[in-house]
Image (cartoon, grey):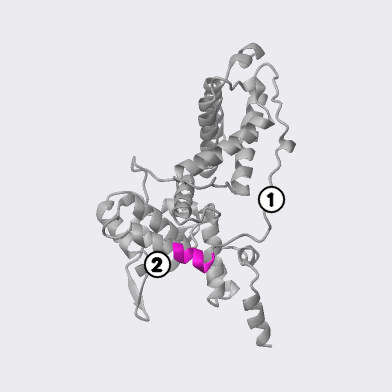
Amino acid sequence: MNYEILKKSGHSTLKKWKKDWFEELELKERDEKTIENYSFVINKFLQFTKENKETFKLYNLNSKIILQFLKWRERKSSSDSNSKTKLTKMSYWTKSNDIKVLKIFFKYIEDFNNSNFKFDIKWYNISLKKPKIEKPHLSNKEVDKILTFLDSITSSNNISIKHCYRSISFKLMLYSGLRASELCKLSFNNFSEVYVINDMDYTDLEIEGKGGTVFSNPIPFDKIKIEYEYLKEHNSKSKYLINTIKNTQTNRNTIYDWMNYIYTHTNQEHLSGVHIVRHTFANRLSDSGADLSEMQDLMRHSSPLTTRVYVKRNKKRMVSAISKL
């Protein structure tokens, strides 16, 4: 593409570049999760440029426009969550991912346009405030508030497939530490027959983790019984536990939006994202007295060092340990 064409091009040309890029990614056999992530971010950027197509031109793309896009993403996230209060903040990790994907995409355009055009994007000027290394988790009060809300939307008067999707997604992550990508792959076949231990009903959840390794986690069936049985009745022929409208596998970004919907509707907009629920699972295990090796098994980590990152320092636990000396 020569410079004169580039000067006149905007949203429509960007769509063509996206098509070319994704064809190359598939030829290079990039993994499905990577392509899904890239596609989501670029589609959001295309939506942003479409809304600004009268003024957006590829040749004047700069750092300011990237920052405007990130702000736009936050506004859209708040709108999608029906937030009537304040802006839903995107996490540092989400913003970093967006920037990483855009950087790779625009580098592709620079490498393959035939006019040697380079964008005036000073990526070093796009600084993000990095959170503390100790990652957050939900407090017991926050969890109780969410579970009360989920009980209300899955009551006999309000229950629906969409409410069940939101509710069972949160509960499966809370009680089994599922990653969003693992949740998306679940089918009814991943749940074992219900069995009883100490008068409590359990089901073993078969989870395909990273690298295709399969694990089995026990979870309390009563916690998900209403949602599971409703979906089993209304979605029994579906390939996946959670489907899109087109009956295909949902994606991590939809799970992300559902979690933010839950946080907004429990007046907890300070919370954000999906992985915080997995951190909560880890800390609840630790608070219940599980040792590091048990936590490592249940979280499906290959190394206990990874598990240790998830567990927040807790003065009560440290005092309890010292008291036994």
Q: Amino acid at mark 1?
A: Lys
Secondary-structure class at tag 2: strand
Q: In this rendering, would 229 be left or right of 118?
A: left
Q: Residues within 10 Å of mark 1 (few under 14, many from 20)?
A: few
Magenta span has 72?
no
Q: From this viewpoint, is residue 93 visible?
A: yes
Q: Residue at x 26, y 52 (%)?
A: 234
Distance between the alpha carbons at the discs numbered 2 and 1: 38 Å
192 or 2, nearer to the observer: 2
The spot of residue 128 in percent (x, y) is 68, 44
Q: Magenta stretch containing residue 141, yes or no?
A: yes
- Magenta segment range? 139-145
Q: Amino acid at mark 2?
A: Asp
Q: Residue at x 37, y 53 (%)?
A: 165
Residue 106 vertical placement versus 243 (above, below) = above
Q: Report which residue position mark 2 lands on.
A: 204
- Label 1 element class: loop
Find residue 171 and report its horizontal and vertical position in percent: 42, 61
Looking at the image, which residue sits at the far top? 4
- Viewer-nearest residue: 270 or 53: 270
Examine the rendered structure and indicate whether residue 184 appears above or below residue 287: above
Q: Quadrant of the N terminus?
A: top right
Q: Which residue is outermost to the bottom?
A: 325
Q: Which residue is mark 1?
A: 130
Instruction: Report the magenta stretch's main SS.
Output: helix
* Residue furthest to the front: 85
Among the two numbered marks 2 and 1 on one chain, the one whose residue lies closer to the N terminus: 1
Q: Check disc 2: other Cα within 10 Å, few if <14, some if 14-19, many if 20+.
A: some
Question: Which quadrant of the figure has residue 305?
Answer: bottom right
Q: Nearer the viewer, mark 2 or mark 1?
A: 1
Task: Say if 184 sits above or below 194 in the image.
Answer: above
State which quarter of the image contains the C terminus. Answer: bottom right
